Image (cartoon, rainbow, N blue to C red):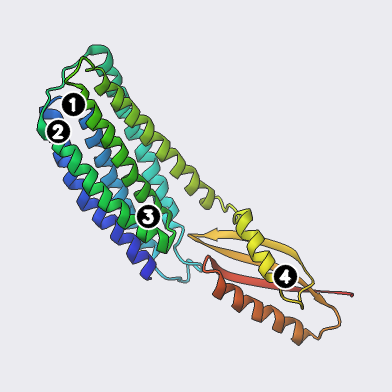
Amino acid sequence: MKRMKQVSRVGFFGILGNLFLMLIKLSSGIVFSSQAMIADGINSTMDIFASFMTLLGGKIAEKPRDCDHHFGHGKAEFLFSLFVSLSMVFGALFIFIEALKGLFTGHELEFSGLLIAVCLITILVKGILYFYSKKIFQETKSILVESNMLDHRNDMIVTSFTLISILLSQLPFAFFDSITSMGIAFWIAYSGIKIFFDSYAILMDHAMDEYRVKVIKKYILRNPKIEGISKFETTPVGYQYILILSILVDGNLSTFESHEIADLLEKKLLKKYPELLTVTIHVNPIDL
């Protein structure tokens, strides 16, 4: 599937970019005693894991239907997104604890132009990865790509605050380095929790959102031969949905005519709405 290959590619480029950033952040953070830079480096380490999960999840999700998985492997996207979210939350907790220790024990950041250069390189690399992921997300609507896209965007903001903390180290604001680390921790935790609940909702078969349901129902009722809808149920399979629908038609129509309406509607719905994986339509005749 082209879609899942695009998802996997986002993960692959993310691994390369984040591996490079992790190495330069951690090494410079340790050498110049910047807790904010070390926290940023740990964040990049988690980003490698997130990108690896995107790569692996995309590979599994692209597998076609088989005798054991009649609707494909699409939910792998959301399962691996859960792993990403949990790693982000635990990583944020570690960063927060270390920053809290530094705030109370005190530490001195050694100012260096290299730290500034690392921040600027990070913002540039993350900017490229963000816009690339955004382009792929607009095409695929994959939650794995979305989590990577948001992560890259967050990293640009986080690194901007790291840059500010480094510049403020020249002033009597050394504590700001620890405060920034704590802020980074909260940001990572918030992003992880959001991804967790988005993924959890799909894995728990959360129905299609009300807006899309309203749009599809309106389209169905444009057919003058359909008198109403008595049932509209959806369940997610990956990024798509299974739709079970019951329509009301004139009871004077023949069985053939009624099912012809249903067959034609099914084809139109699958063609018009790519978020639908399969459509099952029941016909209920009524007296007019």
Disc 3 versus disc 2: distance between alpha carbons? Answer: 29 Å
Q: Which residue is mark 1?
A: 34
Question: Do the numbered discs 1 and 2 sit on residues whose CB atoms are within 8 Å?
Answer: yes
Q: Which residue is mark 4?
A: 221
- The residue drawn where x is 82% and y is 84% is 253
Q: Which residue is mark 2?
A: 115
Mark 1 element type: loop
Residue 182 higher or lower than 195, as above or below? above
Q: Quick one: label 3, few (<14), some, or many (20+) residues within 10 Å?
A: many
Q: Which sits in the foreground, 176 or 89?
A: 176
Tell me which corner region of the image, top left, top right, bottom left or bottom right, holds residue 165: top left
Q: Position of residue 35 (x, y in %)?
A: 22, 26
Position of 286 with respect to 25 (left or right) is: right
Residue 224 higher or lower than 232, as above or below? below
Q: Which residue is mark 3?
A: 145
Question: Which tag is nearer the camera, tag 4 or tag 3?
Answer: 4
